[in-house]
Image (cartoon, grey):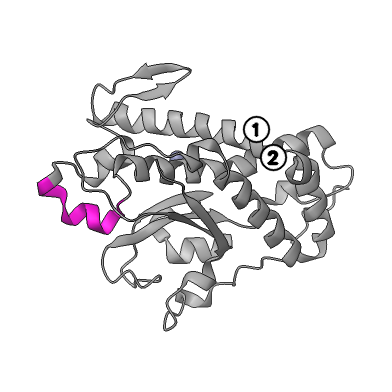
Amino acid sequence: MRAMNLVIQPIEEAFRPEYTPPHGAAPTDLPREARAYFEAAARSLAALPELQGMRTVSPDIPEGPLRQIRVLLASPEMFDCVFPDSAGALGLHVINVPEDDPFGDGGELATELRVMICWPPSPDLVPCPGNMGEFDRNCDAFAWLVTLTHEVAHAVMFAENGNFNVPATLAEMEIEIGRDLFDISTGYGIRALVVDGVEVEPENMEHAADLMEEAVEETGRRWAEVIVTGDLSTLAFLNMLDGQRGDFPLPAPTP
Ligand SMILES: [Zn+2]
């Protein structure tokens, strides 16, 4: 059993020092209050039993040194510039790294467990009195926060399947261990996944990829239901956003 730690920070802090983002994309603006919220969320996530007591499901793969998941928050523009192949996505589990090597991995594959989330959330979440009911805002805030837990769930599944090795190391061992990065990401040929409380064995690769998304979405929702409470409730999140409203582009006022 292993415990996994979480680090959360703006993407710029993870760039290698000589890296210049393409096209001078707008830097990620993470106000102090937002950072405090996410750091508390990261601590709560790391404290979940599933991250405190991570399982070994691939004892045939030599055990690696992984102890940490790095969560990067990126402005949508920065996200699209750094990962043009995933432009428009809300989150990403980073396995392949871009050619210009933004994080200093020194190759095509990540040398750590890394996920990215777009920040700030969609303009729909930005307060606009009279535009949206509180209930809808709470649902939207929760849905957005599930992006965070969903991506972390991808990273946790990868760490378990790959016996705590990073993508770059697993690719080097591919022949020796008889598993490629698709198998490690999805668990294909490694384990059945639990969806709706039922263990399902994938029939083929396409099914394995779908099952992974379903299982990760379910896990992400379950984790969000546990951590998005009290000081981290959707209300607290929205109040934090409201306090920052001057920092976000407001939607056009409804006439
Ligand atoms: Zn996913």
Which amino acid does the dot numbered 2 rest on?
A: Val
Residue at image coords 26%, 32%: 188
Q: Give the residue furthest to the left.
A: 175
Main SS of the magenta part reads: helix
Where on the picture, by quarter, is residue 211?
Answer: top left
Residue at image coords 52%, 77%: 24
Q: Quadrant of ligand 1?
A: top left
Proximity of marks 1 and 2: CB atoms separated by less than 8 Å: yes
Q: Which residues are magenta?
A: 165-176
Neighbor class of circle 2 (other Cα within 10 Å; few <14, some 14-19, many 20+) is many
2 w.r.t. 24: above or below: above
- Left or right? Give the position of 202 relative to 20: left
Neighbor class of circle 1 (other Cα within 10 Å; few <14, some 14-19, many 20+) is some
- Judged from the image, the secondary structure of the residue bearing numbered disc 1 is helix
Please say whether residue 212 is one of the residues in the magenta stretch: no
Using the image as rendered, state which of residue 63 and residue 143 is in the foreground. Answer: 63
Please say whether residue 172 is one of the residues in the magenta stretch: yes
Check residue 225 in the rendering and tell me which mark sits there, or answer none. Answer: 1
- The residue carrying mark 2 is 228
- Left or right? Give the position of 235 relative to 198: right
132 w.r.t. 43: above or below: above
Residue at image coords 58%, 32%: 221
Using the image as rendered, state which of residue 189 and residue 127 is in the foreground. Answer: 189
* Residue 30 visible in the shown view: yes
